[in-house]
Image (tube, rainbow, N blue to C red):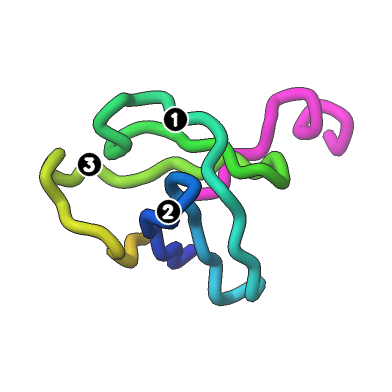
Amino acid sequence: MRVTIRRSGSGLSAYVPKKDIEEPIVKVENESLWGGFVVLRNGWRLLLPDLPEDTSLPVTVEARKIVNDAARKETS
């Protein structure tokens, strides 16, 4: 899914146009942001692509939504 990452006054946020939601990023796997997952305030985990550490924001990327293992087991 396409996601726009931007820096706001209170930190980083992610906008998902397909769902028309913007949520603050509350946790990052990698300090450089890229190539790992981020957690949004609504609980979504998104896997971001590998990009150079100095990538300027805002930027739109193709991210993957990670479904947690517990939810996956319940639906199986």
Secondary element under disc 3, as helix, strand or loop, is loop
**Crowdedness of circle 3 by 10 Å Cα count: few (<14), some, many (20+)?**
few
What residue does disc 1 label? 28
What residue does disc 3 label? 50
Where residue 67 appears, as percent x and y from the top left, is 66, 38
For the point 57% across and 49% down, the residue is 24
Q: Quadrant of residue 57?
A: bottom left
**Crowdedness of circle 2 by 10 Å Cα count: few (<14), some, many (20+)?**
some
Where residue 63 appears, as percent x and y from the top left, is 42, 53
* Mark in front: 1 vs 3: 1
Q: Earlier in the sequence, mark 3 or mark 2?
A: 3
Residue type beneath disc 3? Asp
Residue type beneath disc 2? Ala
Q: Tell me if residue 42 comes above or below residue 57 in the rendering.
A: above
Query: Residue 73 lies in magenta, yes or no?
Result: yes
Horizontally, residue 68 falls left or right of residue 24, namely: right
Secondary element under disc 2, as helix, strand or loop, is loop
Where residue 1 appears, as percent x and y from the top left, is 49, 63
For the point 60% across and 43% down, the residue is 40
- The magenta span reads 63-76
* Label of residue 57 in the image: none
Q: Which sits in the foreground, 75 or 1?
A: 1
* Label of residue 63 in the image: 2
Where residue 62 appears, as percent x and y from the top left, is 37, 60
